[in-house]
């Protein structure tokens, strides 16, 4: 049985790459600290309605605002919705800065999505000790041709720089509703 011998250079290179990956991962993890404060309390009402069968939430969480910046969902009027790209991609809810802490919503559009249909999506983000509540309403439109496979869109809300200040994320809410026609949203 013949054994192949690994060169010393290959061992040094593998060790250096492993060390660089470990240090890089440690540095990235150190940039975002999640702390838990006092006892949480909730109040208010939640009334369920029917979900949009072709537009569902896949996941939510925290991440860094990606580079390059995703396409902006700058449309805040029902008469000029932003059309969804033909393939899965990222979309920015507010103005973003690469590397900032972002809250993300991953939404999946199924193959059963109706064509040229408008959605009104309301994002309510409460941050800080106050808290400060920011509400952003955007309008998107499904493609003119139904997708041949499910597409996942990651919607990012930039919370700011963790390096320059403390970020307190109190609550997040996302509401999607299908409009009766393009330009006519409830």
Image (cartoon, rainbow, N blue to C red):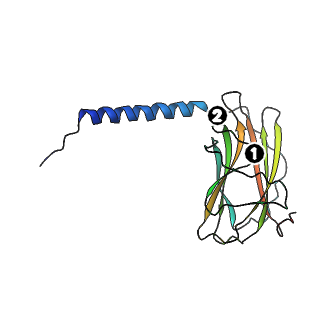
Instruction: State the count of labels.
Output: 2
Secondary element at tag 1: loop
Residue at the spot x=62%, y=59% of the render?
Answer: 152
The quadrant in which residue 134 appears is: top right
- Which of these two is toward me, 59 or 157? 157
Residue at the spot x=39%, y=35% of the render?
Answer: 17
176 lies left or right of 2: right
User: Which of the numbered marks, if any, corresponds to residue 34?
Assistant: 2
Secondary element at tag 2: loop
Mark closer to the chain start, 1 or 2: 2
- Which of these two is toward me, 52 or 67? 67
Using the numbered discs, state the Cα–Cα distance from disc 1 to disc 2 in whole angstroms.
Answer: 22 Å
Crowding at dot 1, Cα within 10 Å, few <14 / some 14-19 / many 20+, comes out as: some
Crowding at dot 2, Cα within 10 Å, few <14 / some 14-19 / many 20+, comes out as: few
Q: Position of residue 117 (x, y in %)?
A: 76, 68
Q: Position of residue 158 (x, y in %)?
A: 71, 41
- Which of these two is toward me, 3 or 130? 3
Residue at the spot x=73%, y=32% of the render?
Answer: 38
């Amino acid at each position: 049985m013949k054994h192949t011998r690994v060169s010393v250079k290959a061992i040094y290179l593998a060790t250096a790459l492993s060390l660089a990956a470990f240090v890089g991962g440690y540095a990235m993890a150190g940039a975002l600290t999640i702390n838990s404060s006092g006892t949480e309390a909730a109040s208010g009402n939640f009334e369920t309605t029917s979900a949009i069968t072709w537009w569902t939430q896949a996941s939510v969480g925290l991440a860094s605002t990606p580079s390059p910046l995703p396409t902006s969902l700058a449309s805040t009027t029902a008469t000029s919705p932003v059309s969804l790209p033909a393939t899965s991609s990222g979309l920015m809810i507010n103005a973003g800065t690469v590397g900032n802490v972002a809250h993300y919503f991953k939404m999946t559009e199924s193959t059963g999505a109706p064509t040229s249909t408008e959605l009104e999506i309301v994002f309510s983000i409460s941050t800080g000790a106050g808290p400060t509540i920011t509400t952003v309403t955007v309008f998107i439109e499904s493609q003119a041709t139904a997708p041949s496979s499910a597409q996942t869109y990651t919607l990012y809300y930039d919370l700011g720089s963790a390096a320059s200040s403390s970020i307190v994320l109190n609550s997040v809410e996302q509401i999607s509703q299908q409009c009766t026609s393009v330009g006519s949203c409830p």
